[in-house]
Amino acid sequence: MSEFSYINFIRRSPVSNKATILGPGDDAGVVKISSGTYVLLAADTLVEGVHFYSDTPLDLVGRKALAVNLSDLAAMGGAENISALVCVSFPQNISGEGPDLLYQGLSDLARLFDVAIIGGDTTSGSQELVISVSVSGTIDPKYLVKRSGAQMGDHIWVTGYLGNSLASEKHLRFLPRLPEAAALTREFKLSAMIDISDGLLNDLQHILRESGGLSATLSREAIPLSPSMVSGDLEKSLEQACCDGEDFELLFTLSPSESARLEASSLAKNPQMPLTRIGEIHPGHSYEPRLCWLENAQVIKFENYGYEHRFGHQNANKSLKRT
Ligand SMILES: [Mg+2]
């Protein structure tokens, strides 16, 4: 069974209460505390051999375990008053300083983003290191952005650069886009947003599906290719930018008028933080949302549309690729 089909299975039997605003299927769950305050809740688990190599420095593992969660909060529009719970299962053969290193990486990033680490659980005995972090944070409902709000004609934008995250170690060292999400949602009305974890195309498909089965065209020239890709092979670089995943950039949509305002704003002119308009949302043509390059309206035929965890069938280690 695939990761997404299991999520869909869970979504068919929702368990909610009167405080639930948004259940499984977005970057975070949303709970209503009062009419002016929602709480975002997200969780992520990293497993040795699946999400990181056994020789990855443990401070970077701890850092990433928190960073991926903060990226999910950013994808909802950002959050304040963020707290984290940390659950770790250490393997029997962990080195003496291993646990300290793990916490050091995690706590350094927590301080940088004013995140409180308020508890968790520690156990041992498994063969692999497993770390699971869950986070909560508050958001004013007017800034909340779901995956499901994209409309026909909306423009598609992305933060930063895409591709080569694994080889360049960006996936271990990235800064979650919390400040950028806050700046964007306070100044502009975003219609949908997601963070790029599974690859640009895969994550755009999530927006298209959740928004009622829309399609999209992307401009090849506009895709912001990571400067760390030096192969000189444009097709290969584009494929990496579209499919690699683990970029942890924000992919968002907004109306043409809001898009024009963003284009003219100082936010879009910050060389430290590129914001790029990469395409446009169109009506859906079929059950499966279509993605086309803008110039020739050809359906993209890449081998994979991103990364999906599968369990029950294949060796998890196969899913890690060194490039
Ligand atoms: Mg996400």
Image: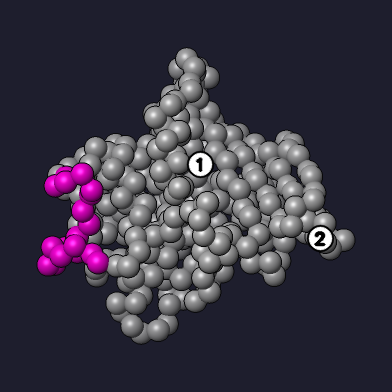
Assign a secondary structure to mark 2: loop
User: x, y (%) of residue 212?
Assistant: 24, 37
Please give the name of the residue rendered at 32% of the width and 71% of the height, measured from the top-left corner: 238
Residue to which mark 1 is pinned? 73
User: x, y (%) of residue 148?
Assistant: 32, 37
Magenta highlight on residue 299:
yes
User: x, y (%) of residue 190?
Assistant: 32, 40
Q: Nearer the viewer, residue 170 or 115?
A: 170
The region drawn magenta spans 284-301
- Horizontal placement of 174 versus 210: left or right? right
Residue type (three-letter) at the residue carrying disc 2 = Ile
**Picture layout, residue 225 above or below residue 103:** below
Residue type (three-letter) at the residue carrying disc 1 = Leu
- The image quadrant that residue 120 belongs to is top right
**Picture layout, residue 323 above or below residue 255:** below
**Picture layout, residue 296 above or below residue 188:** below
Residue to which mark 2 is pinned? 94
Please give the name of the residue rendered at 56% of the width and 60% of the height, measured from the top-left corner: 316
Please give the name of the residue rendered at 51% of the width and 64% of the height, measured from the top-left corner: 319
State how many labels appear: 2
Single out the residue that lies furthest toward the bottom: 232
Please give the name of the residue rendered at 68% of the width and 52% of the height, measured from the top-left corner: 130
